[in-house]
């Protein structure tokens, strides 16, 4: 079974800092990897999706990379803002599968 | 609305009660998923539908959990004889095609079993 791990579990940074969130997965036979944001009491908002053939995706201040062979992905957030405070979840979809396997998330706090 | 909707948003049940959670996917979306998210954890897969067919129910934790999607649109997740360990947020997601890469999530139903 695919296992997804996210480090760190929680992170607190001052506003304006660049930061990196890490995700690792045990089975490299993936179809895609997706980063989500979850605000308290809310559902999941998709941030970036990387297909298995891609190495990175960018959207605004966010950049996600994928190294399938080593089973790792990183989410880079540039110039963090208090509004970025949320839990960030990494999810992997396996080859031939439909469902997602999620990590336990990184809870980010950006201090004004 | 344009997104996935779920109802109720919050449900409190006494241990042993049956509950039914509803999901309205995005119109026209073929695939529908249910996930369970315990406090402080990531969501875990429960079951998957393609139209009205339940193609994968490997994540359902016990035979007390039952899901249906009779007309290929709205889905209901039913939990019989609820237990305290069933307390969690239940998330529904849909995608346009069975092979579509992106899943769109609803706000979830927070179930508390007393």
Image: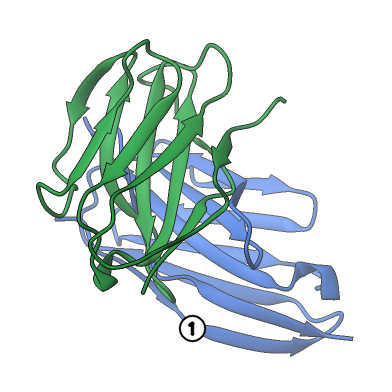
Chain colours: A blue, B green
Where residue A84 sits, quadrant-wise, is bottom right
Residue hosting label 1? A8
Q: Is residue A3 above or below residue A80?
A: above
Q: How many marks?
A: 1
Q: Is residue B102 visible?
A: no
Determine the chain carrying the residue at label 1.
A
Where residue A26 sits, quadrant-wise, is bottom left
Where residue A77 sits, quadrant-wise, is bottom right
Residue shown at 65% from the left, 31% from the top:
B3
Q: Is residue A48 above or below residue B1?
A: below
The residue nearer to you, when weighing B77 against B44, is B77
Quarter of the N terminus of chain A within the rendering: bottom left
**Location of residue B30 in the rendering, given as x and y in whole percent from the top left corner:** 42, 15
The residue nearer to you, when weighing B63 against B95, is B63
Quarter of the C terminus of chain A within the rendering: bottom right
| Numbered disc 1: secondary structure | loop
The residue nearer to you, when weighing A58 against B71, is B71
**Location of residue B91 in the rendering, given as x and y in whole percent from the top left corner:** 45, 48
Residue shown at 17% from the left, 37% from the top:
B57
**Location of residue A57 in the rendering, given as x and y in whole percent from the top left corner:** 61, 45
Mark 1 Cα-neighbour bin, 10 Å: few <14, some 14–19, many ≥20: some
Q: Is residue A105 above or below residue B23?
A: below
Residue shown at 30% from the left, 24% from the top:
B49
**Location of residue A31 in the rendering, given as x and y in whole percent from the top left corner:** 33, 36
Point out the residue furthest to the left here.
B63
Residue shown at 63% from the left, 57% from the top:
A42
């Amino acid at each position: 079974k695919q296992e997804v791990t996210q480090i760190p579990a929680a992170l607190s940074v001052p506003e304006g800092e660049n930061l990196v969130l890490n995700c690792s997965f045990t089975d490299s036979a993936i179809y895609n990897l997706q980063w989500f944001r979850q605000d308290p009491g809310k559902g999941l908002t998709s941030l970036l999706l990387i297909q298995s053939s891609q190495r990175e995706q960018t959207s605004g201040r966010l950049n996600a990379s994928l190294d399938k062979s080593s089973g790792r992905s990183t989410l880079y957030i540039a110039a963090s803002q208090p509004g970025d405070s949320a839990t960030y979840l990494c999810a992997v979809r396996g080859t031939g599968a439909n469902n997602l396997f999620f990590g336990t998330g990184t809870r980010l706090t950006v201090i004004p | 609305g344009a997104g996935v909707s779920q109802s109720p948003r919050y449900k409190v049940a006494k241990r042993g009660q049956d509950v039914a959670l509803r999901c309205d996917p995005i119109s026209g979306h073929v695939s529908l998923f249910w996930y369970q998210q315990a406090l402080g954890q990531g969501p875990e897969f429960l079951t998957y539908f393609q139209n009205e067919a339940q193609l994968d129910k490997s994540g359902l934790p016990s035979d007390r959990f039952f899901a249906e999607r009779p007309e290929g649109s709205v889905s209901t997740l039913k939990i019989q004889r609820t237990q305290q360990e069933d307390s969690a947020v239940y998330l529904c997601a849909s995608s346009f095609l069975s092979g579509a890469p992106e899943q769109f999530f609803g706000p979830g139903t927070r179930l508390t079993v007393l």
